[in-house]
Amino acid sequence: MDRGTAIHTGIEHFLQGVAPLPNEALSLATYYIELKANSPQIEHEWGFTKDWKFTTWDSSDIWLRMKLDACVPGNALVRIVDHKTGKYYPIKAIDQGQLYAVGASIMFPDAEMFKVDFVYVDTGELKTAVYKRSMVDKFKAKFTKRVNQLMLDKVFTPKPNKFTCRFCQVKDFCQFNVEE
């Protein structure tokens, strides 16, 4: 985790113009130089109430917090960038991208498209998802339902499956592990 934090901070400093791009991100230099040229907002903290209204990060009515690595607002398109170390996990990335689209739709009410870039520094990969405003209500309903279920749960019964168990850190001794 310390390594990931150091790389993330190095990229942040590069985008702010106060340091060179970290060696670990040099395979993505073209991407990061282009991003820097678009003057991204760095480390934005977004807070939302359970009614999906914007609130401050430390507000007593906060229900959800999002911290964006980089964001490039636009009239029609909002671009969100998330720096990653490690492997690509499709399920996590899809959910995170959809959640970013919901947040961006609230923060930028005139935008019609939300582009989310997941930049995998260790592998030099870029995974991009583009969401239309017309999709956001569906995502919002999905996340609201999931959080409401979570808030009611008192047992937290495991829900294993082949994909997530494959990457689990405790799979070797977990009684719920599902083998392929």
Image: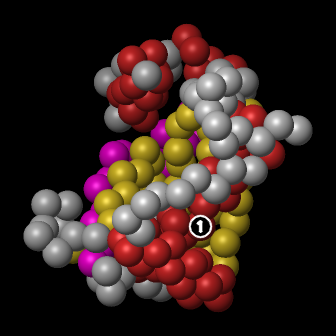
In this figure, what is the number of numbered marks? 1
Q: Amino acid at mark 1?
A: Gln
Question: Is residue 44 positioned above or below 98 on the image?
Answer: above
Q: Nearer the viewer, residue 87 or 70?
A: 87
Query: Which region of the structure is painted magenta?
Result: 31-49
Q: Is residue 25 left or right of residue 18?
A: right
Quarter of the picture holding the C terminus: top right
Q: Residue at x 59, y 28 (%)?
A: 170
Q: Position of residue 129 (x, y in %)?
A: 70, 59
Q: Residue at x 18, y 67 (%)?
A: 56
Q: Residue at x 46, y 75 (%)?
A: 149
Question: Is residue 19 positioned above or below 102 on the image?
Answer: above
Q: Is residue 27 left or right of residue 110?
A: right
- Furthest toward the right, the residue is 180
Question: Can you see residue 40?
Answer: no
Describe the element under mark 1 as helix, strand or loop.
helix
Q: Residue at x 62, y 18 (%)?
A: 26
Quadrant location of residue 118? top right
Q: Position of residue 83 (x, y in %)?
A: 53, 37
Q: Which residue is mark 1?
A: 98
Q: Position of residue 155 (x, y in %)?
A: 43, 60
